[in-house]
Image: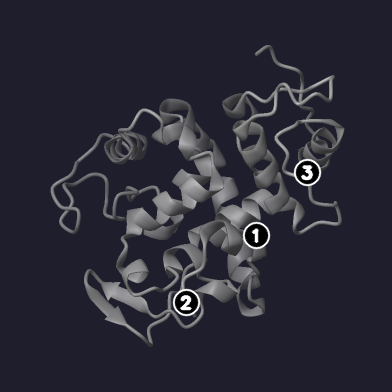
Amino acid sequence: MSRINYIEGFRTIQVLPEWKEDVAAAVATVLENRVEYEAIERSTGIAWPYVASIHYRESGCNFDKQILNGEPWTRKTKYVPKGHGPWESWRDAAIHVLRLHHVASDSASRLHDVENMLAKLEAWNGWGYAKRDLNSPYLWSGSQYGEGVGKFTSDGNYSETAKDKQVGAAVLVHELMSRGEWLPSVELYNLPILSDKKGLHISDRARRFQEALNLVLAGSLIQPLVVDGWIGAKTRAAFHEMTDLELHEVDL
């Protein structure tokens, strides 16, 4: 299977029947520890599902292990990347590593955008699959896009027959969105709620927000939104249906 575009893959992703229990268990584990991941978001501005997905992939959400490569946070890392740590706590390790990886001024906010989040998640694990024009199981394992892609069994060692046994990060994030547990931040997007129809407040931020909503709506009976950058009644109703929250007017 040739490599899939992030957004197209996320929009059409399907959990394979034999993976449904594993996916449900992974989501449950993440949600049990949500308070820890949200604490990291408050400290760094980085979306908590991103942190949770990495922690799950690197250690199965084991808080004795840091998110950089799954080694204990109480010692200096021995494996790639080497020489980091030790830290005083799991949270200190996570904040240090995330700030190390996301030093650009806009990187934290961009991780509230699905396409950028998936790109960063793949980069975290490495571009070895992309160089082979393959979907990364780090993202897609458990879905149709994670089948037949093989696996790097260790750094630099790729096997065509090996199979990833963990739920992919994209699958995990998709499930969180589908259940209404996470959507791109309304405050981040600073969305205008309009009372006129002249298009004066149409924005790329609003378009991206509508695109994100459509990714979730694809699994529901709600009609997809027209991505026009205008946050009107239909967009507000769709957001309320998925989250039970209201979008309110903001001053621009």
Numbered circle sitting on residue 11 = 1
Task: Give the left or right position of residue 94, taking residue 173 as reference.
Answer: left
Q: Quadrant of residue 229?
A: top right
- SS category of the residue bearing label 3: helix
Q: Helix, strand, or loop for circle 1? A: helix
Q: What residue sits right under mark 3 in the picture?
A: 242
- Choose the circle earlier in sequence order: 1 or 3: 1
C-alpha gap between disc 3 and disc 2:
32 Å
Q: Position of residue 164 (x, y in %)?
A: 43, 75
Is 179 placed above or below 107 here? below
The answer to which of 241 and 205 lies nearer the viewer is 205
Q: Earlier in the sequence, mark 3 or mark 2?
A: 2
Is residue 191 at least partly visible in the picture? yes
Q: Residue at x 79, y 51 (%)?
A: 224
**CA separation in Å, label 1 and label 3:** 16 Å
The numbered dot on residue 2 is 2
Residue 138, placed above or below residue 153: above
Residue type for callout 2: Ser
At 42% from the left and 27% from the top, the residue drawn is: 43
Instruction: Give the residue at x 58% y 71%.
Output: 143
Mark 1, other Cα within 10 Å: few <14 / some 14–19 / many ≥20? some
Q: Is residue 57 left or right of residue 157?
A: right
Residues marked 1 and 2 touching at CB (< 8 Å): no
Q: Residues within 10 Å of mark 2 (few under 14, many from 20)?
A: few
Q: Quadrant of the C terminus?
A: top right
